[in-house]
Each structure stands twice: as structure tokens, then as C-alpha cells.
Amino acid sequence: MPFLLSRQDSPLGSMLIVTDAQENLRALDFYDYESRLHTLLTRHYGAYELQNAPTPAKIENALAHYFTGDLSAIEDLSVCTGGTPFQRDIWKALRSIPAGVTKSYGELARQVGKPNASRAVGLANGANPIAIVVPCHRIIGATGALTGYGGGLPRKRWLLEHEQKHAAVFAV
């Protein structure tokens, strides 16, 4: 399966962006987690091929605006993922969590109608191939503690603080 690979700078370091020919996001990860990106692509698609290409303008602009504080800029980006139906349900539910808001694994499990599936939600969250746009960083532990993040806890903390800061501006 051929995909296009591009890179884009961000305040959190260079991002690796994988799209298809229709400019759907297939994966987004950070440069220092490239091996994770390849693991998830293999898990979701089996054999794949990456060809270097420029970042599609719509994606490039949306991410740039997100990082300057327009949190809604990424909401309409088209994503297309592999994964199981349960994983795709979790990833869809993640996109419904407003910027500046966090939920626990248990809350997300209840939201998708699987109240006893917190661990499965955690596994699906960890298998999310599209950072930021499918905002798995908005999921925290039941006690409010920051828990694992594929891009590292410092990035998760930065993303949450960035969203809370800019979401508060729009809420006024």
C-alpha cells in the first residue's frame, strides 16, 4: 500500500505526516518516535510503502494554525485509519472531546457504551496512529494524573497546557 511521507516543524519538534493519495491523514507522529510510526503502520496496514512528498497544504496550514492557538483548525482534517472496529470507535470518540478538556479511560469507555472496558480503551488509545488530530493526549488517569503518551509525557503536558490556555481564550 503506497503512502506519502512528509515532515513539518512544530513547537514540539519535527512531525512525520503520512497521507494517502486523497490527502487523508493515515499517521502523524514525532521524528524521535519514527520506529513507533512504522510499527503502527505495519500493524494497521501490513506491507506499505512510503514515498517522500510535500505536506498537503490543508494539513500543513491546519497544524500551523493549531500550534498558534486556533485549536479548531484540525477538527475538519480527514483521517483514515486501519485498526479494529473497536479501535476506530475509540479514535472517533477521541475526536469528540473538546480541546481543553480531558477524560479518563473509564469515562471514555462509558462514552462508547463499554463501561467495563477501560483497559481496552487504553490499548486502543495507545494504538492510535494519528497524534494531535486524533487527540489521545486528552486521556488521563482516573486520578487526574498524566499517563502514557506515544510522544512522551513532556509533549502530552505541553499539548494539554497549550489547549487549556487557548480554549480558555475562546470560552471568554
Image (cartoon, rainbow, N blue to C red):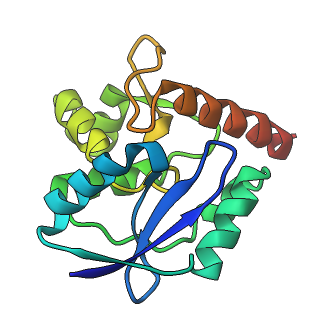
Whole-percent x and y of residue 144? 48, 15
* In this rendering, position of residue 9 left or right of residue 52: right
Whole-percent x and y of residue 18? 41, 69
Q: Residue at x 53, y 55 (%)?
A: 15
Question: Which is more toward the observer, 169 or 136?
Answer: 136
Whole-percent x and y of residue 81? 29, 67
Q: Residue at x 53, y 32 (%)?
A: 156
Looking at the image, the residue that sits furthest to the bottom is 21
Looking at the image, the residue that sits furthest to the left is 46
Compared to residue 3, the image places residue 66 above or below, namely above
Q: Residue at x 39, y 89 (%)?
A: 21
* In this rendering, position of residue 76 left or right of residue 22: right
Compared to residue 58, the image places residue 69 above or below, namely above
Q: Residue at x 58, y 46 (%)?
A: 98
* In this rendering, position of residue 144 left or right of residue 105: right
Compared to residue 132, the image places residue 75 above or below, namely below
Question: Which is more toward the observer, 135 or 103?
Answer: 135
Q: Quadrant of the N terminus?
A: bottom left
Q: Is residue 83 visible?
A: no
Q: Quadrant of the C terminus?
A: top right
Question: Which is more toward the observer, 48 or 160?
Answer: 48
Compared to residue 106, the image places residue 110 above or below, namely below
Whole-percent x and y of residue 26? 36, 69
* In this rendering, position of residue 19 left or right of residue 102: left
